[in-house]
């Protein structure tokens, strides 16, 4: 069991706010004149996505997908299951996927492949945190908040066994 005393701050809420502002400016610029479908990957992306969309100055539609590859542990099983599919039509739409973290790349690669088969007009990925040291599958990240070390992180939607999502900063779990 992880205790609050085992958490060390990695990225402050102020740094997160600055990154969200930067990402929103880039997305506003790139999607000007478009009406993107923004798909959040549940559960982890919901905090980041809520902060991000409030800064987007363009018409948009929201949807969600829920995938499972971790269970309640710290290691990906490598097998991805779709728990909840997006309900909005994807074909011919400009789709922006919002994710909390890209780790091995297996889960998000699976999702991007799934969405590509639905023939969107465009498909881009916005990620709060990237852990490239653990990458097993290449993933094209179009909008990136932070590159993080090979440590287990929580907060700002990221969890450990469904705990710590509500923390406003991002922390490393110290073993």
Image (cartoon, rainbow, N blue to C red):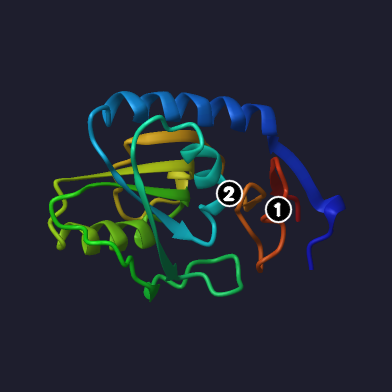
Residue at left offset 35%, top offset 27%: 28
61 or 141: nearer the eye? 61
Asked if marks 2 and 1 touch (Cβ < 8 Å), the reply is yes
Q: Which residue is mark 2?
A: 47
Q: Tell whether 104 sits left or right of 74.
A: left
Residue 157 image position (x, y, % from top left): 60, 52
Label 2 residue SS: helix
Q: Tell whether 9 sits left or right of 98.
A: right
Cα distance between the residues tagged 2 and 1: 8 Å
Category of crowding for the residue at label 2, using alpha-carbon neighbours closer than 10 angstroms: few (below 14), some (14–19), many (at least 20): many
Residue at left offset 69%, top offset 46%: 172
Earlier-in-chain disc, 2 versus 1: 2
51 or 1: nearer the eye? 51
Q: Tell whether 81 sits left or right of 43.
A: left
Residue 53 image position (x, y, % from top left): 47, 40
Judge whether 49 appears above or below 25 on screen. Answer: below
Q: Which residue is mark 1?
A: 166
Residue at left offset 54%, top offset 57%: 44
Category of crowding for the residue at label 1, using alpha-carbon neighbours closer than 10 angstroms: few (below 14), some (14–19), many (at least 20): few
| Quarter containing the C terminus | bottom right
């Amino acid at each position: 069991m992880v205790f609050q005393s085992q958490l060390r701050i990695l990225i402050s809420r102020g740094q997160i706010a600055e990154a969200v502002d930067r990402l929103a400016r880039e997305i506003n610029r790139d999607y000007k004149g478009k009406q993107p479908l923004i798909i959040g990957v549940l559960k982890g992306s919901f905090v980041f996505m809520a902060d991000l969309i409030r800064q987007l100055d363009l018409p948009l539609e929201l949807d969600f997908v829920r995938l499972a590859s971790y269970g309640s542990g710290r290691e990906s099983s490598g097998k991805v299951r779709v728990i909840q599919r997006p309900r909005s039509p994807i074909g011919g739409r400009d789709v922006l996927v919002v994710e909390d973290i890209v780790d091995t790349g297996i889960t998000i690669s699976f999702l991007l492949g799934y969405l590509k088969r639905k023939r969107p007009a465009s498909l881009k990925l916005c990620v709060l945190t990237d852990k490239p040291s653990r990458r097993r599958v290449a993933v094209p990240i179009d909008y990136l908040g932070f590159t993080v070390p090979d440590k287990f992180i929580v907060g700002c939607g990221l969890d450990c066994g469904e705990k710590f999502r509500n923390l406003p900063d991002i922390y490393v779990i110290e073993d």
